[in-house]
Image (spheres, rainbow, N blue to C red):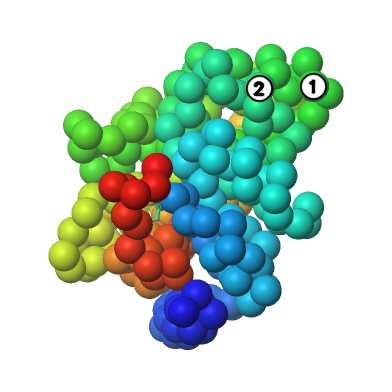
Amino acid sequence: MVKENLLEVEKHIQAACKRAGRDRSEVTLIAVSKTKPVSMLNKAYESGIREFGENKVQEMMDKYDELPSDIHWHMIGHLQRNKVKYLMGKSYLIHSVDSLRLAQEISAQSVKHGVETDILIEVNIAGEETKFGISGEETIQLVTEAAKLPNIHIQGLMTIAPYVEDPEENRMYFRKIKELSVDIADKKIDNVHMRILSMGMTGDYEVAIEEGATMVRVGTGIFGERNYGLKS
Ligand SMILES: *Cc1c(COP(=O)(O)O)cnc(C)c1O
């Protein structure tokens, strides 16, 4: 099932790239494997997937130990400061930095462990109260402050768009965050790159690609529905 799903997702990614006049190589597919067993991740790995996304530190660490070492692990979930230390040298990219205090902790732990850590700033572009992430207005301030910290490197922005029936409803949010990333890039702040735009999930990744996503995070579309009642 995983292999067939991946072929399907790949087809949609290629079609979206084509519609947008973009090269397929500009978009990285992250397989979001939270709650899913290692056996399913192995299936995706056999299909060539090397980018996996998890939203819990402990679960990521467990899977890290069980799967091949050439995998890039993406931390996409809300991150508590006391857990940052476990990710050092293991997480390829932390997508969910939404406060200066968290950025400071990632910086401090990176220094302590002698590693460099790439991060994205999570923007709550639709201003939903139930979501983590900072507002568009706060983003430039956080980027400016976090850029001064040692051993961390801001590589772009991440957003979780609202859950909608029709993905077209999210197009304006994807467009807004793309504009924000261009505005920030134009400021040419030291140690700030806007080369990554992490946006788009199972329901809306094609629209996200059309609007400039460079990373899409697809879970359900690859691994099927998650059952939180049985596994967490
Ligand atoms: C779970 C999750 C995804 C994947 O969601 P699907 O709708 O299953 O594709 C993407 N991004 C984040 C931050 C998530 O927590």
Which of the two discs, 2 and 1, labels the residue nearer the N terminus?
A: 2
* Residue at image coords 47%, 56%: 36
* Residue at image coords 32%, 54%: 227
Q: How crowded is mark 1: few (under 14 residues within 10 Å), some or many (20 or more)?
A: few
Name which quarter of the figure residue 59 lies in.
top right
Residue 189 in the image: above or below residue 13: above
Q: Three-letter amino acid code at disc 2?
A: Lys
Residue 101 in the image: above or below residue 43: above
Q: In this view, does 210 lie to the left or right of 69?
A: left
| Residue 124 shows up from this direction | yes
Q: In this view, does 197 lie to the left or right of 232?
A: right
Q: Three-letter amino acid code at disc 1?
A: His
Residue annotated with mark 2:
85
Query: x%, y% of residue 50?
Result: 67, 62
* Residue at image coords 71%, 38%: 90
The foreground one among 73 and 93 is 73
Name which quarter of the figure residue 113 lies in.
top right
Labels 2 & 1 near each other (Cβ < 8 A): yes
Query: x%, y% of residue 16?
Result: 42, 79
